[in-house]
Image (cartoon, coloured by chain):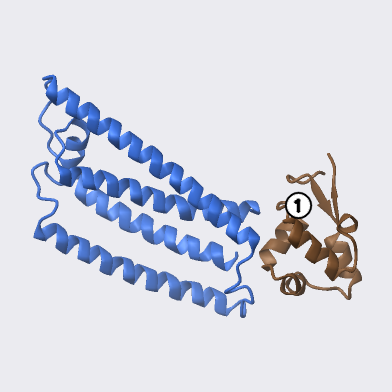
Chain colours: A blue, B brown
Amino acid sequence: MSRQERVSWLALVVNAIIGAVYFQRVLSLPATADLFGLRMAGFAFQLIALSIVVSIVCELALRLVRKGEGSDPDRNRTDERVTLINLKARRNAHAVLWAGMFAALVQITLLEWAQRFGHGHSVPQTVLGLMVTGPLAPMHIAQVLLLVMTLAGITVYASRIFYCRRGY
Amino acid sequence: MMPPTGITNQIRKLRFEKNEMTQQQLADAVGATRQTIIAIEAGKYAPSLELAFRIARIFSRGVDDVFNYGP
C-alpha cells in the first residue's frame, strides 16, 4: 500500500467517524434545539479534540506499520499519476458537492412552497424530521450544507483509495 | 491478455536486461513513484508522452521499442 493510499485511509476514517458522531447527534436533537447555542459549541470543540486524538492514534499506527517496512523513498514524491488521481478525486467530490447542493436547494424550495400554499404537515420531533418536513431555519440549512461538504470530503479520500487500487 | 489501457510494454524485460534494475531504481531515474512504475508495467496506467520518452531513454531505446499500442 502506497503512502498516498495510507494517508487517504487515515483521512477517510477520521472524517467518517467525526461526521457520523456529529450528524448522529445533531439530527436526533429535538426540533426546537438551538443548533448555534453554547452546548452545541462545546460539542463541536469536543469533536475537534476527538478528531485530533483519532488522527494521532492512526498516524502512530501507520508509523508502526511503516517501521517494519523500512524507509519509503517515494515519501515526498509526486508524479503525474498521483496528480491525476488527485484531480479525479476532486472531480468526484465536486460532483457530489454539486448534486448535494442542488438536492438541498430543491428540498428547501419545496418546503417553502408547501408552507406558502398551506399544505399541512405533521409537527416534527427531531432536527432530522424538520429537515424532511420543514419549516427550515437558517441554522438547519447550515447543517444541510455542512452535511453535503462532509460527504464531498469523504468522496475525495474514498476516490483516491479507489483509483490507487485500480492503478490510476 | 490486453491490458485495460490497450498499451503493452517491455519494461519488465528491459529492466532485467539492464542489470536486473529494480522498479524503485527505474522510478528514481525517471522521477516517478514505484507505484506508478508498477501500474505502467501491469498496463493499468498509460504514461504521458514525456514519461514514456524518459523511460525509453533509460533503456537507450525508442518509445515504440518499449511501448506498443494495438487492439
Where residue A168 appears, as percent x and y from the top left, is 63, 53
At x 21%, y 65%, the residue is A45
Secondary structure of the residue carrying tag 1 is loop
Chain of the residue under label 1: B
Q: Amino acid at mark 1?
A: Gly
At x 45%, y 64%, the residue is A10
At x 14%, y 41%, the residue is A137
Nearer-the-camera pick, B15 or A109: A109
Q: Which image quarter holds the N terminus of chain A?
A: bottom right
Where residue A79 appears, as percent x and y from the top left, is 64, 65
Q: Image check: A91 left or right of A2?
A: left
Residue labelled with disc 1: B43
- Whether A115 is drawn above or below A81: the answer is above
- Whether A151 is drawn above or below A134: the answer is below
At x 28%, y 50%, the residue is A146
Q: Image check: B4 left or right of A12?
A: right
Q: Image check: A19 left or right of A143?
A: right
Count the labels in the image.
1
Nearer-the-camera pick, A82 or B4: A82
